[in-house]
Image (cartoon, rainbow, N blue to C red):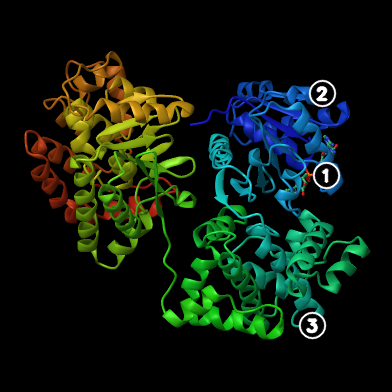
Amino acid sequence: MAQIKSIGVVGAGNMGSGIAQKIAQEGIPVVMVDLKEEFVQRGLGTIRRLLQEGVERKLFKPEQVEQILGRVKGTTDFKALADVDIVIEAVFEDKQVKADLFKQLDRICAPDTILATNTSSFYVREFAEKTSRPDRFVGLHYFYHPAKNRLLEVIPHGGTSPQTIEKSLLAAKLHGKTSILVKDAPGFAVNRFFVPFLNEAARMLEEGLADIATIEEGGKRAFRIGMGPFELMNVTGIPIAVHAATTLGNELGAFYAPAALLKAQMEKKANWKIEGQPDESKLAAVVDRFQGVCLGVAAALVDEGVASIEDTDRGAKIGLRWVLGPFEIMNRIGIPKAYEVVQAICRKYPDFRMPGLLEKQHALGKPFEFSFVDLAVKDGVAWITLNRPEAMNALNEAVVAQLGRRFDEAEADPRVKAVVFQGAGKAFVAGADIRYFVDKIKAGRIPDIVAFTRKGHELLLRIEESKTPTIALLDGLSLGGGSELALACQALVATPAGSMAFPETGIGIYPGLGGMLRMARHVGPELAKYFAFTGAYLTAADLQALGIATRLVPPAEVDAAIRSLVAAGRPDKYRARATPEKFKPFAEMFAKGRVPDLLAGKVPDGVNPELAGKVLKTLGYKAPVAVRIANEIVDRQQGLPMRAAVEIELERLPDIFATADALEGLSTVGRRRPEFKGQ
Ligand SMILES: NC(=O)c1ccc[n+]([C@@H]2O[C@H](COP(=O)([O-])OP(=O)(O)OC[C@H]3O[C@@H](n4cnc5c(N)ncnc54)[C@H](O)[C@@H]3O)[C@@H](O)[C@H]2O)c1
């Protein structure tokens, strides 16, 4: 895997300073260049101010601000960019300025430096052609504000090499971005439907379909967003909307061209006046119009191969903060209704045609199916990627079923010498979909939870027992079911960002996918209980010290580590090992004879009372029934073969999910601390 040591950013304006800030925040040195010292200083000042706001909001500690700023080198000397791995251009949206800049960068930068443009409205290829390195040229389109919005459109043009794409995706991941892969097409993916959304607001107003307040409210309801189109334009600038619609109109036809009223408002140099109450009687028509435009355009761009349906949805959810992506909305309102609202748009704008994709789906009469798990085979290694970063790759029925299918495909492929499981985005897998559990409990369908968990166990056992080596790449957070998936793999490669934790007892349930069982086999029942009962967080270094992580390597060495693991043959996963000093006190505290005292809220004999006091405080926040059942399960599992031990875990699921505490714990996640009653 390629390595990213430093990144350059040209332009210290709104976007450039934000991009540089985010890169530095994630620990990567960054060189930020602008034309004049005062512009550089202004950019650095913006970064400092935003970081300071972060301190006030308790996102950073004051000393972190200095460390982050220490990683940003602001300069007017372009030669400082000579040796960076990637240069991201974020200068004025002017074709000539950008073209000249890329010619200059091409001369200055080392041959292997990748050049990237953050243009919003030009083709990436136009600038790539200006350089002697079109293969090392890519579009990286950020979203405002780039230090806060996680979305990044990665845009290869026809001549971008696979190595450049790979390195760009790695750079994106390393600075905390969720990337979607998009073709070099007008508006890329997100602006292609976002700009028509803004434009359609002005058109409806122009036609007198409704007033500003009603259209504004309709826009919010159509996509469940906090700001409607007029407020969004007021905040980001009406000229930007006009400019973007003009470019799309020139490239794609009259349907995309800016409304006369939109241009007139820009000429007035005034913001939209949003006042009064929405007219409820007109809202449904407004919502239909917005959905018709956005869903139709989303289907059209997928039809043209600009992005996949999953990446288009991701773009809307992460980049625009819609609650659902366009394709998820189509499924929710139903394909017939989606077809009807898009058809109305086709009738209204003759140059907009019904996208073939929607035509086909309508004929099928079925909702869209999403792929959440990707499989790619490279140099004999099957990479299975859980690709639902907007939900931190949480496991649900569809994900587990697809994971199983992808694993089957990988195992059946004669080229495959090892299977690696990884998560897209920042997390590995953040547990299971909590909503699923809550819905099932409320519907009185706990047996469905048991059946789902049983399927999960079967898959995890197959992963653990497979003749093809299975490796978890833990390069981000994992929780609950995610940690359990990682533990089921025959080997585990962690990067320093990898972590595990079992938060279940804090939400009224117990780790039900073999987490306690496999932890006990690794580190003994005492520490398995400690981690399961307290939810204590295991860092990558802890995982290595405990012998759970087979290798701990920096991100750039992951490929090599995987190759060496495959060459070394099957590891002795549950070999006997010594307990590291750091964990000995906890192993002693959770010895079988002492646990009853802990569960009764008492300091057991023979342990450090101060440490025990802390542990008891933590246990005080956990669901007592969950901890008690977890304790019984770990005890009963000892000495049993794997499958028999799994049955014990499954056996208690109906009991735990029927408790009032499970419903309380699961339904309060992310809202408030649960109040457990011990029943
Ligand atoms: N604003 C957004 O929401 C947004 C979103 C995505 C992409 N973009 C794109 O990002 C780019 C930058 O936008 P912005 O809003 O940050 O603009 P900005 O005007 O705030 O900043 C541009 C900066 O580039 C500097 N600059 C101009 N020419 C230069 C050169 N030759 N060398 C070095 N520095 C130079 C300017 O001095 C200025 O500081 C544009 O291409 C824009 O389309 C903007």
Residue projecting furthest to the front: 132
Q: Position of residue 297 (x, y in %)?
A: 63, 70
Q: Amino acid at mark 3?
A: Gly
Element type where label 1 sits in the image: loop
Residue 291 numbered tag: none
Indicate which quadrant contains ligand 1: top right
Q: Is residue 549 visible?
A: no
Residue tagged by mark 1? 92
Residue tagged by mark 2? 77
Decide: is 299 above or below 642. below
Q: Earlier in the sequence, mark 2 or mark 1?
A: 2
Decide: is 18 above or below 266. above
Residue tagged by mark 3? 208
Residue closest to the eye, 474 or 655? 474
Residue at mark 3 to residue at mark 1: CA–CA distance:
36 Å
Q: Earlier in the sequence, mark 3 or mark 1?
A: 1
Residue at mark 3 to residue at mark 2: CA–CA distance:
54 Å
Residue closest to the eye, 110 or 180? 110
137 on left or right of 382: right
Residue projecting furthest to the top: 581
Ligand 1 closer than 8 Å to label 1 CB: yes
Q: Position of residue 607 (x, y in %)?
A: 22, 17
Q: Residue at x 44, y 41 (%)?
A: 427
Q: Position of residue 152 (x, y in %)?
A: 61, 47
Q: Nearer the viewer, mark 3 or mark 1?
A: 1
Residue at mark 2 to residue at mark 1: CA–CA distance:
18 Å
